[in-house]
Image (tube, rainbow, N blue to C red):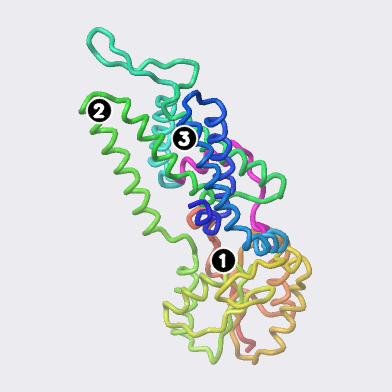
Amino acid sequence: MTAALLYSHYWAMWLGAATAIVVAVVGWRSVDADRRRGAWKALGAMAVGVVLFVPWIPVMAYQSAHTGTPWGEVFRPATILVVTMTDFVGGGFGELQIMSYVLVVAITVAAFGTLRVRAGQQVVELSTAPRARIGAELSVFGLTMGIGWVTSVAASSTFASRYASVVAPLFVLCSAAGLAMVRTRRATAVLTALTCAALVLGTAVEIVSDRTQARVVADVIANEIADDEPSDAVVVTCPDQLAPATLRALENRGIDAEVLPFPRGDPRFVDWVDYEDRNSAADPVAFAESLLSALDDDTTVYAVVNTHYLTFEGKCEALLAALASDGATLENPVEGSGNNFFEGMSLWVRRPSS
């Protein structure tokens, strides 16, 4: 299991380290001989899983040295925790964020609460000291997130909530433990129904929501080609991260236009190897001049642009300026919408010369 986790998700390293720490503490402090033996056996099994991962270490080292996450900035620990909790429930929608807060309260109750009988009724009493009820699960969760944050700071890497998927089962278990503290049948049914409804809603919203503005851009390009019937058209994307979504959206509309990513590459993929260095060395003016010199006079150039991507500071603006450096005019039929789309993009059109 350890090896399978490590091969499938690098953040499993932090999960494994956190689990090993907790298991080692259990093995060291437990007075029960069987419990101690079980802890040391578990650590031994994890060690075997690490050994099985050794053949992949050169690949991981290469990826660490040449790829990383140049597309994002380092997150603060509180930001990592908040983003993780809200995205586990359904993302940045207000109603679903409220449910994430409810589950955080449930986890807090499970961690600090104790069931007592008062006046013939069961009540939950909160204390200032954490209880052992979900101590191991919550410790592994917190240590995993903490180790992940420390390593991201040390490596100057960013964070995405999908990285925390390794602790999602622990989040579910801890939340369920808190909800189980409610002992009235009606309240349990209501809380369970609300939680399930929120999770289903969050899944449904993510499925039907467009993460990219590429379809909007492709619709405009498709309509223009159908109306004006230019003899040729080429689509430039800046940065290259916009190319895969743009290409798929155009293909879905039946448009067979050539898609050229800036600074270079296959439009179906994003090449992350030495990404920041390559983008820093890229010359948008030379790219535009080479493009225009290779095109016929009656070719329409569509430029799909987002000027807010890291490692492209000023590059896309310079590319647009270079496309108009010969006096050609650029039209802007689509404005980028970062508020409505995770991947916003604007569309600029350079018409054929008359």
| Disc number for residue 137 | 3
Q: Which residue is mark 2?
A: 187
Residue nearest the observer in this picture, 134 or 82: 134
Residue 210 position in % (x across, y down): 43, 61
Q: CA distance from mark 1 to mark 2?
A: 49 Å
What segment carries the magenta color?
Answer: 67-88
- Residue 316, placed above or below residue 198: below
Which residue type does callout 1 highlight? Answer: Ser
Which amino acid, mark 2? Ala
Q: Position of residue 108 (x, y in %)?
A: 44, 26
For discs 1 and 2, the disc positioned in front in the rendered view = 2
- Viewer-proximal residue, 84 or 11? 11
Q: Which numbered disc flags the more N-terminal residue, 2 or 3?
A: 3
Q: Can you say whether 340 is above or below 131 in the image?
A: below
- Tell me if mark 1 has few (under 14), some (14-19) or many (20+) residues whose alpha carbon lies within 10 angstroms of its own: many
Q: Is residue 270 magenta?
A: no
